[in-house]
Amino acid sequence: MPKPIPLCDIDTAAFSFQEALERLLEATDSVEEAEKIAVSDAVGRFLSRDVITGIDFPAFRNSAMDGYALRAEDALPGAILSVVGVSSAGHPFRGDLHRGEAVRVLTGASVPEEADVVIVQERTRLLKNRVELTMLGPPPVGDNIRDQGEELKVGQLLLPKHEQVTAQNIGLLASAGLSHVEVFRKLKVAFASTGDELKAAGAHLERGDIFESNRTVLGALLHAIGVESFDLGIFPDDRDLIRGKIQAASQWADVIITSGGASVGDADFVVDVLRELGHITFWKVAIKPGKPFVLGQVGSAKFIGLPGNPVSMVVTFLQLVRPSLLKMSGFQRWKPFRLKAVSLDQIKKVPGRLEFQRGIYEIREGALEVTSLSAQGSHRLTSISRANCFIVLPETCSSIASGELVFIEPFEAFGL
C-alpha cells in the first residue's frame, strides 16, 4: 500500500498528472473474486482465466468459395469432369471422389477427403452432369480450401485472462461451443455529491440553490464502465453526516467516489473526514480543470474525491478514475488514445499545469483539424456537451499558434 503523504505536504504541492495516474494505478489491484456467467451476458466483463479452445478452428476442411472440389491432378484447363454430388453447409458429400470427378461445393461446406483443390465457379462451365474447367492454368494444391485447425487447434489459447469480452469475441466464444465463461465480479462503487446548495431535479430552488448534475453524470459514466454502482444521494455540508455515510459505505463498497467538498473552503469537509477515517495518498493534481482531487483509503475501500465543478469532475473522472476502475475490474492494457490534429485557433495557456481543453475535431481532406471552444470555464457544462474531444496541452506549453499540431483525445475513446 502506498505510504500516505503528510497533510502539510499535501496542502502545499500538487502532483503532476503522470504522478497522480501512476499512484492511482499502483494503488489498484484487480478484484480477485470471479463468477461464471452466460456468454450472452458477458459483454463488457473481464475474463478471470484463460479460455482454451476445445475444438479446432475450423472444425473440418471447408471451401472458401462456391465452386467444385476435385483432385489436383484433374485441375487442368479445358478438363471436363463428372459432377458426382453436392456438398453444402450442414450437408456434406458422403461418397468417395475418384479421378475425373468433381463435387459441387458451397462456401463453408465440407470438402471431400480426396479433394485437394476447389475451382471457383466463375472458372467453370456447367454441361448438364459435367463441368468444364475454364481457368488459364493449374491452381496450387489447397487452393480455396480452409484446412482443419488452420486458425486454432484444440488446446490453444482462445482469449487470455483479463481480456474484455466484446461483441466481436462473443462470436469467438460461441463458435467454440462455450455457453458460459468465468469473469471477475463487478466492482461495487458508491457515489455521492456534496453541498447544501444542491437540489434534486424537480425541487424548488431558493436563492443560491442549483440543480445537482454531477451525480447524474457520475452514474452514467459508471454505467458505461460496467461497474455495480450505488447512488448515495446528496450529502449536505455536515461533517458528522459525511463521516457516517462514508464509514458505512466503506463496509461494503470497493470504491467510494464523492464530488465536491475536496477543496479548501470552510464547508469542504471531505479531506478532513478522510484523514479521520483512513488515510490520504495524495491531494491536488496539477491539471486544468480538476486540481482538487483526493485519493485515499477508508478500511478496505478506495476513496476518490472529485472536484465539484461539473467539467472538472468529468475531466478527472475520465483521465484518472476511469483507468483505475478499469484496472480494478480486470483490465490490464490501458493507455491513453491520442491523435495529432491541426489547431485552427490560437490557443492561450498559462504554463504549470497539464490542460484538457474541450474542442471539436473534424476530418477534412484526410487530415484531422480541431477547434477549441471559446467557453472553457470549469462550471460550463456546455463545453463538454458540445465538444467531441479533449485538446491536451502539456504543462510547459504557454500558447499554441494557429496551424500548429496538437494532441487530441476523441470522446469516442472514452465510450462517450
Image (cartoon, helix red, strand yellow):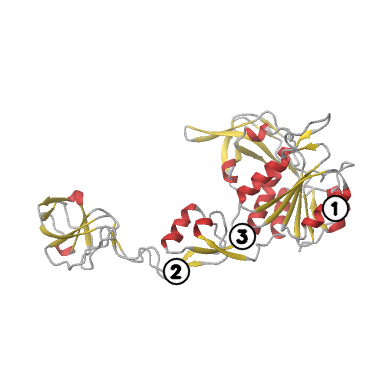
Q: Are marks 3 and 1 in contact (CB under 8 Å)?
A: no
Residue ranking furthest to the bottom: 155
The x and y percentages for residue 184 are: 60, 62
Local crowd size for mark 2, using a 10 Å CA cut-off: few (<14), some (14–19), many (≥20): few
The x and y percentages for residue 335 are: 61, 52
Report which residue position mark 1 lands on. Answer: 243
Q: Earlier in the sequence, mark 3 or mark 1?
A: 1
Q: Residue at x 33, y 66 (%)?
A: 148
Number of on-image labels: 3
> The residue under label 3 is which amino acid type?
Gly
> The residue under label 1 is which amino acid type?
Arg
Q: Earlier in the sequence, mark 1 or mark 2?
A: 2
Report which residue position mark 3 lands on. Answer: 330
Can I make out residue 394 in this image?
no
Local crowd size for mark 3, using a 10 Å CA cut-off: few (<14), some (14–19), many (≥20): many
Cα–Cα gap, marks 3 and 1: 30 Å
Q: Residue at x 65, y 49 (%)?
A: 222
The x and y percentages for residue 155 are: 44, 71
> The residue under label 2 is which amino acid type?
Gln
Position of the C terminus by quadrant: top right
Can I make out residue 14 in this image?
yes
The x and y percentages for residue 410 are: 58, 41
Report which residue position mark 2 lands on. Answer: 156
